[in-house]
Amino acid sequence: MRFDGKTALVTGGASPIGQAVARRLAAGGANLALADINSEALEAVGAAISPDALLSVGDLSDEAVANDFVQSAIKRFGQVDILVNNAGGGVIEWTPDHTATTIRQTIDRNLWTTIWTTRAALPSMVENDYGRIVNIGADSVRNGLFMHAIYNAAKGGVHAIASGLAREYARYDITVNVVAPCMVLTPQVIAAKKAGLPIVAEMEAVIPKGRSADPDEVASMVSYLCLDEARFVTGQVISVNGGSTMQ
Ligand SMILES: NC(=O)c1ccc[n+]([C@@H]2O[C@H](COP(=O)([O-])OP(=O)(O)OC[C@H]3O[C@@H](n4cnc5c(N)ncnc54)[C@H](O)[C@@H]3O)[C@@H](O)[C@H]2O)c1
């Protein structure tokens, strides 16, 4: 039970990757606090993974909602040890086809959720001289994938805040890293494949392994970075991408 006694917060807990991460952390003995804007899906994940999980519904791009999530977790479990900033999701579109609304949505979902939740969680980590923060970024930031410029503007910030924070908090046993997946085989991608949409094949064509990642392949790297023994890995962007960028 490698996360015994630890309290882990996962944002976007209702998503396929969030769920896979939560499952691994719970299997390792962590107390779980999951947040998402989608209440129905979050309840289903909570029921499937851990009846003791704290479930928090709200828009984490609102500072007050993010604070409330973190404070509820501290009230229930006493502290925050692990934070996985997984809330996000892109509006994947060619740049001229975006609207002001879809651009704001993309930045809100990915970057503002990360900024507010992290700021809320750090004081508890500093107090306990312990923290593992993992942001879910995107390999498209590195390979400039088509239709991803706006998404990359948001995820680029998610990558960048990790290096800055890693340095700011290096004097504590607090690490801050990014796991950057290529396309992941979520139900949405499976449905698009079944519908014969060419974008899936086009996006898989840039992956040398020739397929999308499984959510648990991403969760496996996240859970490693959340371990005590990963204490010397900080400020890194680690791709789980089937080779779609290398080095
Ligand atoms: N699926 C992929 O191919 C892929 C590739 C690279 C990165 N990612 C990233 O992985 C993460 C998980 O994605 P996924 O594919 O498992 O499913 P997803 O994109 O549906 O996950 C996003 C989750 O975040 C939640 N969310 C969005 N905005 C929120 C907000 N303002 N407040 C609270 N919750 C909010 C959504 O309800 C959803 O459950 C996301 O950050 C996504 O950008 C996914």
Image: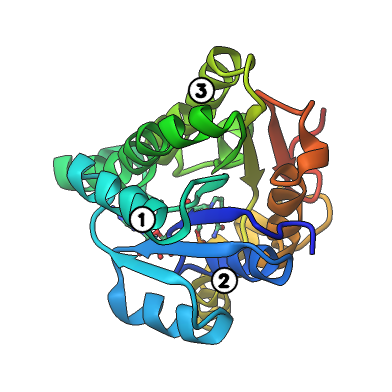
The reply to whether residue 224 is visible in this rendering is yes
Can you identify the residue that label 3 sits on?
Answer: 160
Looking at the picture, which amino acid does disc 2 mark? Thr
Q: Nearer the viewer, mark 1 or mark 2?
A: 1
Check disc 1 and report its element: helix, strand or loop: helix
Query: From the viewer's perspective, is 229 left or right of 108?
Result: right
Q: Earlier in the sequence, mark 2 or mark 3?
A: 3
Looking at the picture, which amino acid does disc 1 mark? Lys
Quadrant observed for ligand 1 in the rendered image: bottom left
Mark 2 CB within 8 Å of ligand 1: yes
Give the image location of residue 139, x and y in percent: 62, 40
Please report the residue visible at 35 percent of the width from the left and 63 percent of the height from the top: 36
Check disc 2 and report its element: helix, strand or loop: loop
Can you identify the residue that label 2 sits on?
Answer: 186
Which quadrant of the figure contains the C terminus?
A: top right
Query: From the viewer's perspective, is 179 left or right of 14?
Result: right
Which quadrant of the figure contains the N terminus?
A: bottom right
Give the image location of residue 89, x and y in percent: 41, 54
Can you identify the residue that label 1 sits on?
Answer: 75
Give the quadrant of residue 162.
top right
- Whether 153 is drawn above or below 182: the answer is above
- From mark 2 to mark 3, how far is it between C-alphas? 26 Å
Looking at the picture, which amino acid does disc 3 mark? Ala
Mark 3 CB within 8 Å of ligand 1: no
